[in-house]
Every structure is written in structure tokens, then in C-alpha cells.
Amino acid sequence: MVTSTYWSRRVRERSLSRRGFLKGSAAAAGGLGAAALIGCGDDDDDGGGDPGGDGGGDTEPTPSAAAAAPADGSYYSALGGSTFSMDQHRAVTSGGIITYAYDGLVSYDDINVGSMRGVMADSLPEQPDNLTYIFKLRDGIKWQNKAPANGRDFTADDLSWNLQRQISRELKNGEIGSDFALFGTVYRHVESFELVDDQTVKIVLNGPRATWLDGMAQTQNTMMFRETAERIEDDPNLRSADIILGTGPYIVEDYNPEGQSKAVRNPEWFLKKQGEEVQYFDTIINTALPPDVNARRAAFEQKQLDWIGGSLDAGNPYPFQFIQSVQDSVPDLEVQDAGDPNNNRALIMSFQRGPFAIPQIRQAYFIAIDRQVVVDSDYAGQARPDGPIPWPYVDWAIPQEELAQTPGYRQDKEEDLKEARALWEAGGGPEIGPIPMIITEGPQGTAAAEWFGAMMKQNLDADLDVEFVPGSSLFPHLIGDTFTAHLGSLGAWTSPDPRNRFTLSHHSTGGINFAKYNDPEVDKLMDNAGATLDRSAAIEDIKAAQRIVLADANGGSDCLAGGTLRYLKWPYVNIDLHPWRAYWHRQVQFRSWIDQDDPTFEGRPTI
């Protein structure tokens, strides 16, 4: 069975030669992107071959499946693992099961149409002018019933501490934290906030910011309990269910980032008690498994996992051939394809230290990368070159036909290599020696080091000095004093509007600007784009900023190519495996459920 999602309906990927790829990419990408996501455009289906080669095309869900009503009960089981930080204010990537313990003021409701809803706030904020946001808290919000909160009410003091901590970034020892990364583009725009009364907060920005509410709706922009947050400050390596404490729908009982974690329904969650359509699962299970396709396949086919697919490990997709073999072996499975902006191969280069601090060297390296080799090596041809903003954001990204004329993307690679080698010589490349590069450990990382190293050896006679690191310890390397380069992916594209995320990695004040890129003209364009309520003007400014960074190694945060992801799921689990994986957490809280009457539910293990 094949089901249709927004992303799979909009476009069908093909495996193409370099000439065919670049010639056809503009037309193929034309129907996919943020504009259509929020309700514009049509849903053309050209009937072409899809990424896994099943040849059947997509169909809408069957009437019987669509007619089934959501029901409480059973559990949801997915892969899980560790995170860079247990501190939601300072984490860079989602912590999986941890996220279900927390709430924020607002969130996306249906990201497919761009709608938002109040969560801790009883509705979206009042906006008496373009600088002021007034949030009214719901009644009955309580911290979870575990120490040290023990189910007490969420207070105005709790709200004030959470806001002040993220605005000031001040830790309890008085130091200013350098790792409040994801929401710098949200809280640095807050001029002041005022607790009008115990349930009302007025936030005033220092200038108009069209993307501000989008940032407030992000999954990890949540409220933490002060005592547990400060325990994490004392021991950043602490990993324990004891410090996972929020107001959210699930209470984490067990947390083992190397094994199995468990969360159970919070009976006192305010939205459930107020009769909202939320929280159908009794229990959530996350299991950490190594990036071994056979182990994951076995767990999935035994229904210990509800779905499989997407990324095998950090930034590395499951091989299409593997997903196809699982699909062929179990014909009842549902298939969802997603053109995922987070499914990218990327290179981050430090502009402050090492060889890439030399402008000619970094631009030579950037131009010498053969994007088609990336597409073929990482994605079996099922991908497209990325500009500074990934191609699924069609309205915002540099068009594929324009990229095809840009150094580093040109159809005639010999023209690229001629320019790259000249820059390499001019910058002293032949005398540099092996370039230090960190890569996430695992089979996919090992393979990437081999093909990328071979490609750069052939194109520039440049060698690599690779250090493999666990994904959970990657962040300290990226902000460390010796960081030179990282080959991996650029995640955290979690919104239908890419402005906040692009600013995070390319603005001089960006919280995940690991390259330390700094261009005042780019800053100005991004600031203008973030402030304006004119979407067309914002798009033009963002494209202008991208054209500037393209001339300087993509600002050191270079998405080389991005592909689609294919997911397989059992029909009994009703969840839309959306390209913005961070949004799944909201789906689990609001709409997803297990159909225990579905025939495929038979044989599912109990917990």
C-alpha cells in the first residue's frame, strides 16, 4: 500500500545523468516548497518513477483507513537515542522522547497549511501593534508529578525565569552561555517583557520581526523547571529521567540513550483535562539501535518499531535499495516519501582557523566539490544539488537552473576544476598538507570519508585527516577551539519558513554559525527579510543574501546536495511522517494514534 503526503504528491525524483539532472531539475522542483506548503499551488502528479522504484505511483489512503476513528490506547514505538544536551534551551537537535515532557506557549498545529495554535497560551497572542505580543496562559497548567516539582502549579515566576534565561543567556554562576543556539534569532529580538498579571505576559520586540512567532512555535522552544535546568548546568553530561521535568503530555519514567526509554501519559496534562483532541497513546517507547540496517529491519518486521526509514544515522539516509527490499518483502506496508530539507550532505568550514581561513582555499575547495558525485554516492542519484537553502524550499531557494550556472555547480565540471585549481595554487594549497575534518562515526560516515576523500584527491590533490566522533559529542567539536571542518549534515530545518534557520547559520550573531561567517551586507539582508511582513520582499532579500554567500564558499555552511527520504510504516499506526521531523513530536501529542482493529496490528508485541 502506498499513501500520499504533501511532499510525495508534489514531485517525483528521478535518477539522471548530470546533463539530464540539471536540465530537468527546475521543472521538477517547481511544485515543491514552502509556498505550496501553506496552501498555494497545485498538486500535480506527473506519474514518473519514484525514488524507490516501485513503479506504482502514489494513491490516496483507502476509504476504510480514512474512515477509522482515532482511539485511545496502546503504545507508540520508534527509534531513539541521545542528544547533545538535556537542556531544551541549549540543545541543537531534538532529544526524541525528552521532547514529549515539555510544552511551549504556542506550536504549529498543522504544519502542512502553516496553522498555529496556543498550547500553554490559551490562543495565539494578541498583537496590538507590530512590536507587541500578549500571551494569556491557560488555567490548570501544572508541572509533572515528579520531584522536585511534585505536581505544583506553573506560576508567573516560572514563566519569567524561562523567558529571562533565554533573553539574557545567563547561567546560575553568572556566566553568559555560548550554546543557546537554536533560539538566538527569537530571543535577541525581545526588548522587554512584562508580567501583566499571574496569567498574562506582554512581550515587546526591539523591531518588527515577521518570523518571531514562527520561532516561538518551534518544538524545543519550551518551558523548563529551574532546579532541573540548573542541575544540567552543573553537569552537562548528566543523562537521567530524573532531570526530564516539564508540564507536557508524557512523563519520562526511564531514559537510557544507549538502550530503551519509556514515557507514560501524564494524567494531569492540562490540554487533556480540558477535553482537547490530544494524546491518544498510553505509552511511548524509544529504542536506541546501532546504524545497522539488518538490526533495524528485524525490529521493524517484528513490529517492535512502528516505522522505519528516513535517516539511518546523523545525516545519512537509509539506502534506497534496502528500503525497497523491505517494501518488497512486506506488501502490506504503507510508503511515504518526503523531500526533506534535513536530508542533506553538508560541509562546514571554519573561517577563523586552519586552511579555510584563507579565502582562495575555501572557495577553491567549494568549487572543486562535484555535486553529482555527492548525489550518486550518498543518494543513488535520488537527490539535487543544494544552494545555501535546501531545494525543497522552492520559493526561497536559488533555482536549480541558476545554480547550474554558478561556480561549484556548473554542468561542465572541467570549467569548475580549472578555476578551483587556480585558486588552490594562489592560496598555497599544495603546501597545506592534509585538511583536518571531523565526521560522525558509523558505516555511512566511513563511506562518506572514503568517497569524499577520493573526490577531493582527484580534483585538487588535497588529502584529508579524518577524526570520527560519536554523533552525541559532535556539538562540542563544532564550537571547540580547534574546529576546522565537518562533513555531515545541516539539520534543524524545522519550519515551513526558512528565514530563522538560514539566519542561525549565516548571520554574524547566528547561534549555529559554526563557520563564524561574517558579512555585514548579508546580515542586513537577513535582518530586513526577518522584519518585513511582505513575503515577496523577504524572498528577494533571502535570495540576494544567498547569492552573496555563494561567492564565498556558501558562507562556510555548505549543503552539497539534498535528497528525498522514504519511510515504511505499519498501517496500524496513524502518523504522517513529515519531512520536518521535529514536527512529529507535536503529531504524537495531537493527532497520531494506533488502530488496534487494523489487521496488521495482530502479532504486535505487548510491553
Image: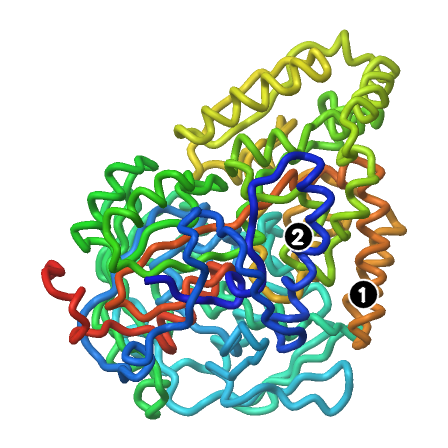
> Please, what is the three-letter code of the amino acid marked with disc 2?
Trp
- Where residue 161 appears, as percent x and y from the top left, is 53, 71
Q: Quadrant of the C terminus?
A: bottom left
Q: Residues within 10 Å of mark 1 (few under 14, many from 20)?
A: many
| Residue in the image at 56% along x and 72% along y | 217
Residue 225 visible to the viewer: no
Q: Quadrant of the N terminus?
A: bottom left
Residue 319 visible to the viewer: yes
| Residue in the image at 53% along x and 69% along y | 162
Q: Is residue 53 left or right of residue 167?
A: left
Q: Is residue 342 above or below residue 190?
A: above
Residue position marked by numbered label 2 in the rendering:
391
Of 368 and 505, which appears nearest the observer? 368
Residue 529 bears which disc, if any? 1
Q: CA distance from mark 2 to mark 1?
A: 19 Å
- Where residue 227 appears, as percent x and y from the top left, is 40, 63
Nearest to viewer (mark 2 / mark 1) = 2
| Residue in the image at 43% along x and 45% along y | 311
Q: Is residue 215 left or right of residue 539?
A: left
Q: Earlier in the sequence, mark 2 or mark 1?
A: 2
Q: Secondary structure at mark 2?
A: loop
Task: Determine the image quadrant of residue 574.
Answer: bottom left
| Residue in the image at 84% along x and 61% along y | 541
> Please, what is the three-letter code of the amino acid marked with disc 1?
Ala
Q: Secondary structure at mark 1?
A: helix
- Where residue 66 appears, as percent x and y from the top left, is 33, 80
Q: Residues within 10 Å of mark 2 (few under 14, many from 20)?
A: many
